[in-house]
Image (cartoon, rainbow, N blue to C red):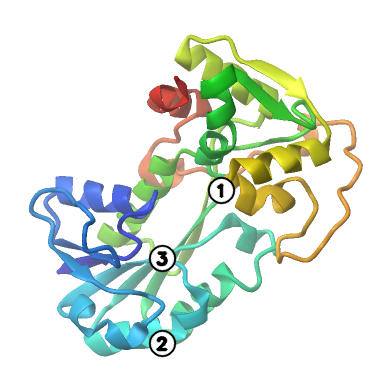
Amino acid sequence: MTILITGATGNIGRRVLRRLAEAGEPVRAMTRNAQAEFPAGVPSVRGDLARPDGLDEAFQGVERLFLFPVPETAREVVDAAERAGVQRVVVLSSGAVTGGFDTDFHLPVERAVEDSGLAWTHVRPGEFALNKLWLWGPSIRAEGVVRDPNPDGVAWYPTHEQDIADVAVAALLEDGHVGRAYDVNGPDLLTYRQQVELIAEATGREIRVEVITRQEARERYLAQGGFAAANADFLLGFEDYSGAAAEPAETAEFDASAIPPMPTAEPVTGRARGFAEWARDHAADFRP
């Protein structure tokens, strides 16, 4: 049984790959990058989900597939997998599908897999804790500060990326997960200020929180580049989930009791990592 990991250099795919390799499972990495490095003994194959007509070599002998979402070609990719004899597909999806916000990115991938008749499991993570490294990392490293327009009025359950990967590994290896969609969130409901405090504790540094306007935050994220620039308008309310222009809503007084507990990895893997653990795991990434 060979397991193919697409998106094998990504934040989740590489962790799925590592877990499977450590367990001695026959795993193969698919990548577009000829220079990518993988754990010792793990074979790699060139492949691009955007070009499904070139996936025959990647799918050869594969029984189970971890599928990174590329909606434009999802049906062609799944057709190629089915022709090659793949039997089970675990989809990296999004909790936004559960909430009804995602109708044109992750949802089409889920539907392509379901319509194929292959055994499937969807892994639907919520907010990645990693977002805070990509958004706040530069200013924390350089100045020891996080700037945000509403640090006490926004809260959610940031998710450790290893929890997401571990759910995917369980779905790839174990029985009992076929036909299930797993929402994976962190166990802790935290405001941005509380998250900053946990990062400060993990790093042993004082980190200030500075309140700025939404427009100022937008300008800073756009200037920062990378993930921050690409997601500034959505994160700050200037566009909706589908990318349409929106007017940032007035922030109501925050009421933690109005946000119910969210599903975590624990029912599948036996544990759910909190944000404090995530901050400790990434402490070095926040230091100068």
Position of 200 relative to 178 (above/below):
above
The residue sitting at 63% across, 20% down in the picture is 145
The residue sitting at 48% across, 85% down in the picture is 115
Which residue matches tag 1?
Answer: 227
- Is residue 7 shown left or right of residue 264? left
Q: Is residue 117 visible?
A: no
Identify the image quadrant of the N terminus.
bottom left
- For the residues marked 2 and 3, what is the alpha-carbon distance in whole angstroms? 14 Å
- Is residue 138 shown left or right of residue 170? right
Which element type, helix, strand or loop, lies under badge 2?
helix
In primary-sequence order, the first of circles 2 and 1 is 2
Tag 1: residue type? Answer: Phe
The residue sitting at 58% across, 71% down in the picture is 107
Tag 3: residue type? Answer: Phe
The answer to whether mark 3 and mark 1 are in CB contact below 8 A is: no
Position of 182 relative to 210 (above/below):
below
Please state the horizontal and vertical placement of residue 38, each as a whole percent of the image.
Answer: 19, 52
- The crowding category of the residue bearing disc 3, from other C-alpha atoms within 10 Å (few below 14, some 14 to 19, many at least 20), is many
Question: Which of labels 3 and 1 is toward the front?
Answer: 1
- For the residues marked 2 and 1, what is the alpha-carbon distance in whole angstroms? 29 Å
The answer to whether mark 2 and mark 1 are in CB contact below 8 A is: no
Which element type, helix, strand or loop, lies under badge 3?
loop
Tag 2: residue type? Answer: Glu
Q: Is residue 163 visible?
A: yes
Which element type, helix, strand or loop, lies under badge 1?
helix
Identify the image quadrant of the C terminus.
top left
In primary-sequence order, the first of circles 3 and 1 is 3
- For the residues marked 3 and 1, what is the alpha-carbon distance in whole angstroms? 18 Å
Please state the horizontal and vertical placement of residue 2, each as a whole percent of the image.
Answer: 16, 68
Which residue matches tag 2?
Answer: 76
- The crowding category of the residue bearing disc 1, from other C-alpha atoms within 10 Å (few below 14, some 14 to 19, many at least 20), is some
Which residue matches tag 3?
Answer: 68
